[in-house]
């Protein structure tokens, strides 16, 4: 029906215009903040653009930063489909990375393709199980998953540090305790012609696959019912427990893969550099993308760009590195506040026939 | 003053001293969150408010030379951020957990940004009250060096417990938290009560943060908080939203945090990372033990979004 | 519909104005750069004003800024991940830097090595790394200072000042550079009295203020009356020591202002020498100095001025040892040396001069240190 289709278009336009307007408003508020501190806001915007999107180099910088964020954002967005708010991606990243490093080292004699696949799988399984733990605690003990996943993150980081500096430490890695190196042949290379590793490719593929899963399969449909109305889902006889656990597994697997890729493409071993806040940045991306797997990719590029531009702001304007944090915080708050505008703005309201 | 070799006695004394020292920010933040959650909101942005309070307290103390003015300023900063949270959550369809995470990011970023010039200078710190003067041992004296904020927090816990039980204001907050329909029927503006509760909660969290920068460890730097704001949220649940139990829980968490260094100082040196994780494991264990999916958490405010 | 079109128009106009302004600002921002002969980039892992490691590096960078024909760009709080590769790349591509000082240990492998291969014309001067001939590219150099000499002197002064004969050391991670400092401190104190012990507490990470304060308090509860540390920012340890009324030896940078009563002396970096050498070499087009090490003799490290509490005989004793170190005559690590489990780590008759690379792989704690690696 015509009105149905126009309703769909209106919906899509709303979902695009409101977040973009919120982000634009965040830039304005940030500009005012900068002006209040005596900086020229236009100069700040110019430097942000220059640092993030102006040259081939800055694009590579931005995309490299975006790559892990795409995967860790899925760790928030996927459970959100089922109504869970999981923010423990950081824990899954570090444990996934540790597993990958251990697997890579243990198998280092074997064919590199096999090693790489095993590392990725290992990272995904361990990461998935960690988040599934939070999901299980919610499902079977009623423990709020936001708090439990966050506490599990702290526990995961402590476990990681304990193992990396203790039992799993490579004795020759003296001044920077790391696990044993997986060997150069087992490292993941860069995308052809670019200076960005394959993690970006994995992330995009994972997002597209998850989008298809959530929007077009029965499983995804069941997930969204659980997320929309858990009581109705239970009444309809949906296996809520299984759905919650599997979606947490998937989300955790994404984050674990991010950790595994960091190890396999950048460091070659697991060490403290893995604890880099990718999980937390992923939360930001997921919320700005309103938990939509497809939207995660452009949002991750945007957030990656903002982080990339932080360096320029520091070096040219002598601004502290927390400047980008402030901008991200403002953006986050405004995006959340803009949730209230859905269905209220005149141009997007359905016309009464 | 003779220094007596304490040996293994150093561990419990260290833990008690550490419990008193480290628990005060937990105490204030959890009392504030207690008020907020009793009114039906959950504020995860306490971590950001804590750090913002620490920074503003330090800055004002340095600028004015009076640490108590710093505490006041920290409370003010917390009030403003709590107000922001409350107002944001009043908008329709806005999820308070998400706003909390956003506030955590914003508050932390803002505090680091504005706090840059204050890492170097040394601001006047809060005085301590020597409760251990009866002991000849300097270690016990040091362990019982109590900060006035700790005593204020204790008094506050008692007052809040009484207020929730016996005053009209306490009843209003509880009603808004248990059933917003009933409160509305009685004519109370539910959003206004919640906003005020969140703002007051933020104020207390800010004061808790000022303790970190103005007493222990007593300086401003960017690594000051290690998740205390978030642990306080779990603490409130553990304490079943009861202010007096919040006090005991805060002591427990403070002691758990002090266990690691105390053990190391008597020679138990392996596995210090695992000891560092002790408070989080304790929190998680407590939550697992006390929650149940079948019935809502006993004593939980009915409107609290984490129960739905 | 008309309203919407109107709004779009206004929005387009505003966007256009903003875009024009941005382009103008962009041009202006671009013009300010590239005028000088040499552009130097400095990268810190933490904040520049941390009263510790990064501050010491920043002081050298500040000295560079005074040199003519030189522009210094700095970036702080860059973590030891691909972030630093991107930062180095930005400095090279966007700022035109040709000499970089990435100052944190963890930047070396793989980050600096990778960037060095990619940009063979740019010089990378790294602090603390172990540059090896044949293994690492020629446009990378490492510089480091033998600050354990100053920790040894800290120990001597502490040994004279302590009344309980118990010293404390708060360390971040038990890596060789840190172990060397702990051992030197303990050995310096034991030259005064062989019964002195050093209690070690490891906090687990480079910057954990609450843990550092707790560690200091635990040590003091155990009777320690002089404490020192190896963490990124010794500020908290110094302030806690002062508040509890014990003595403290500083590290990295000058902390005497934090503990006016309890400060004894300190072990400080003086990076101006290696920084200046690298800059001068770069400006003159001379090949890069790949391996720079120095102690008190070469001015890479220095000791802090003695505090009020240091007695005259302690000053004389420490100054005597320092004089020998400045001449290059003093050997700290010589046999017979046992670790704290009783195993001999340096046999009798054997000695390791400060420049001996085997010392940079230290993995033991000497006799007299209470703790485990």
Image: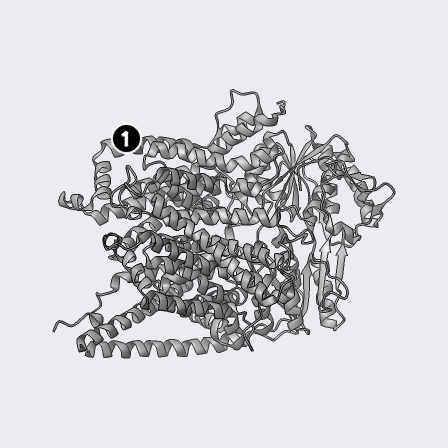
* Left or right relative to C101: residue B252: left
Residue B146's x, y, as percent?
A: 47, 30
Residue at image mark 1: B162
Residue B278's x, y, as percent?
A: 49, 39
Residue appearing at x 66%, y 58% in the figure: C60
* Left or right relative to C292: residue C56: left
> Given the image, what chain letter belongs to the residue carrying mark 1?
B
Residue at the far right in the pictured view? C349
Q: Name the image quarter holding residue B105.
A: bottom left
Residue at the far left in the pictured view? A353
Label 1 crowd bin: few (<14), some (14–19), many (20+), radius 10 Å:
some
Residue appearing at x 26%, y 61% in the figure: A340
Placement of the N terminus of chain A among the 4 image quadrants: bottom left
Q: Is residue B305 visible?
A: yes
Q: Is residue C84 visible?
A: no
Q: Name the image quarter holding residue B142.
A: top right
- C182 vs A49: above or below: above
Q: Nearer the viewer, residue C272 or A70?
A: A70
Q: Name the image quarter holding residue B272.
A: top right
Residue B297's x, y, as percent?
A: 30, 40
- C40 vs B112: above or below: below
Q: Nearer the viewer, residue A75 or C29?
A: A75
- A68 vs C351: above or below: below
Residue appearing at x 47%, y 74% in the figure: A53
Q: Nearer the viewer, residue B208 or B258?
A: B258
Colouring rule applied to residues: one colour
Placement of the C terminus of chain A among the 4 image quadrants: bottom left
């Amino acid at each position: 029906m015509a009105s149905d289709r126009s309703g769909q278009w209106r919906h899509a336009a709303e979902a695009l215009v409101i977040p973009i307007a919120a982000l634009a408003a965040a830039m304005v508020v940030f500009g005012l903040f900068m002006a209040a501190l005596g900086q020229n806001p236009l100069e700040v915007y110019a430097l942000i653009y220059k640092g993030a999107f102006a040259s081939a180099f800055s694009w590579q910088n931005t995309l490299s930063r975006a790559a892990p964020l795409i995967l860790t954002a899925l760790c928030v967005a996927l459970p959100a489909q089922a109504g869970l708010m999981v923010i423990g991606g950081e824990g899954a990243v570090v444990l996934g990375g540790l597993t990958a490093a251990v697997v890579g080292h243990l198998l280092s004699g074997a064919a590199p393709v096999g090693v790489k696949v095993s590392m990725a799988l290992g990272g995904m399984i361990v990461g998935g199980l960690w988040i599934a733990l939070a999901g299980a605690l919610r499902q079977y003990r009623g423990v709020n998953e936001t708090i439990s996943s966050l506490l599990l993150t702290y526990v995961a980081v402590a476990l990681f540090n304990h193992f990396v500096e203790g039992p799993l430490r490579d004795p020759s890695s003296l001044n920077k305790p790391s696990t044993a190196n997986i060997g150069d042949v087992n490292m993941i290379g860069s995308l052809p012609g670019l200076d960005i590793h394959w993690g970006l490719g994995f992330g995009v593929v994972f997002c597209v696959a998850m989008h298809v899963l959530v929007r077009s399969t029965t499983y995804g449909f069941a997930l969204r019912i659980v997320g929309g109305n858990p009581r109705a889902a239970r009444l309809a006889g949906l296996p809520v427990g299984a759905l919650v656990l599997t979606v947490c597994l998937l989300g955790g697997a994404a984050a674990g893969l991010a950790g595994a890729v960091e190890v396999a493409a950048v460091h070659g071993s697991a060490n403290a550099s893995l604890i880099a806040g990718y999980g937390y940045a992923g939360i930001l991306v997921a919320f700005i993308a309103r938990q939509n797997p497809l939207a995660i990719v452009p949002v991750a590029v945007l957030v990656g760009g903002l982080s990339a531009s932080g360096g320029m702001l520091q070096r040219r304007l002598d601004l502290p590195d927390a400047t980008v944090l402030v901008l991200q915080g403002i953006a986050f708050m405004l995006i959340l506040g803009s949730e209230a505008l859905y269905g209220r703005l005149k141009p997007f309201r359905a016309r009464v026939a | 003053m003779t220094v007596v070799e304490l040996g293994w006695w150093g561990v419990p004394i260290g833990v008690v001293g550490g419990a008193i020292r480290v628990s005060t920010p937990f105490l204030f933040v959890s009392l504030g969150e207690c008020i907020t959650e009793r009114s039906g909101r959950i504020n995860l942005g306490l971590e950001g408010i804590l750090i913002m309070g620490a920074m503003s307290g330090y800055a004002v103390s340095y600028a004015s030379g009076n640490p108590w003015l710093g505490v006041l300023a920290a409370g003010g900063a917390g009030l403003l951020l709590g107000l922001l949270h409350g107002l944001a959550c009043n908008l329709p369809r806005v999820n308070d957990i998400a706003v909390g995470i956003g506030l955590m990011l914003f508050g932390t970023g803002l505090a680091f940004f504005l706090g840059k010039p204050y890492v170097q200078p040394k601001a006047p710190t809060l005085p301590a009250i020597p409760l251990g003067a009866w002991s000849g041992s300097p270690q016990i004296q040091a362990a019982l060096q109590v900060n006035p904020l700790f005593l204020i927090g204790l008094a506050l816990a008692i007052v809040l417990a009484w207020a929730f039980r016996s005053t009209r204001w306490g009843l209003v907050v509880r009603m808004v938290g248990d059933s917003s329909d009933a409160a509305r029927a009685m004519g109370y503006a539910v959003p206004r009560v919640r906003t005020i509760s969140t703002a007051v909660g933020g104020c207390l969290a800010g004061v808790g943060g000022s303790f970190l920068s103005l007493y222990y460890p007593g300086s401003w730097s960017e690594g000051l908080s290690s998740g205390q704001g978030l642990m306080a949220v779990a603490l409130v649940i553990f304490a079943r939203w009861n202010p007096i139990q919040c006090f005991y829980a805060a002591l427990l968490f403070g002691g758990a945090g002090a266990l690691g260094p105390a053990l190391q100082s008597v020679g138990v040196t392996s596995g210090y990372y695992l000891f560092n994780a002790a408070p989080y494991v304790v929190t998680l264990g407590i939550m697992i033990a006390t929650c149940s999916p079948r019935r809502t958490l006993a004593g939980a405010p009915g409107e609290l979004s984490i129960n739905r | 519909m008309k309203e919407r079109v109107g709004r779009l128009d206004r929005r387009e106009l505003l966007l256009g104005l903003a875009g024009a302004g941005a382009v103008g600002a962009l041009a202006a921002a671009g013009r300010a750069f590239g005028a000088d002969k040499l552009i130097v980039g400095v990268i810190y892992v933490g904040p520049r004003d941390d009263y510790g490691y990064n501050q010491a590096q920043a002081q050298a960078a500040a000295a560079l800024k005074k040199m003519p024909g030189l522009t210094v760009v700095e970036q702080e709080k860059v973590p030891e991940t691909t972030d630093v590769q991107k930062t180095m790349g930005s400095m090279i591509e966007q700022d035109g830097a040709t000499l970089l000082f990435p100052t944190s240990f963890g930047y070396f492998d793989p980050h600096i090595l990778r960037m060095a291969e990619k940009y063979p014309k740019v010089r990378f001067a790294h602090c603390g790394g172990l540059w090896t001939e044949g293994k690492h590219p020629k446009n990378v150099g490492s510089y480091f200072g033998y600050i354990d000499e100053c920790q040894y002197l800290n120990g001597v002064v502490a040994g004279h000042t302590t009344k309980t004969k118990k010293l404390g050391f708060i360390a971040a991670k038990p890596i060789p550079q840190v172990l060397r400092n702990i051992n030197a401190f303990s050995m310096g104190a034991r030259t005064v009295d062989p019964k002195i012990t050093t209690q070690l507490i490891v906090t687990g990470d480079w910057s954990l203020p609450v843990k550092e304060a707790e560690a200091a308090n635990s040590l003091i509860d155990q009777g320690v009356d002089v404490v020192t540390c190896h963490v990124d920012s010794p500020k908290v340890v110094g302030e806690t020591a002062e508040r509890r009324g014990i003595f403290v030896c500083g590290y990295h940078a000058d902390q005497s202002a934090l503990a006016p009563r309890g400060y004894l002396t300190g072990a400080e970096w003086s990076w101006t020498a290696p920084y200046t050498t690298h800059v001068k070499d770069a400006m003159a087009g001379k090949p890069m100095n790949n391996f720079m090490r120095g102690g008190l003799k070469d001015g890479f490290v220095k000791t802090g001025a003695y505090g009020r509490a240091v007695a005259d005989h302690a000053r004389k004793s420490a100054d005597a040892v320092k004089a020998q170190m400045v001449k290059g005559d003093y050997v700290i690590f010589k046999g017979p040396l046992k670790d704290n489990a009783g195993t001999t780590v340096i046999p009798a008759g054997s000695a390791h001069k400060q420049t001996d690379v085997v010392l940079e792989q230290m993995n033991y704690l000497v006799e007299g240190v209470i703790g485990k690696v």
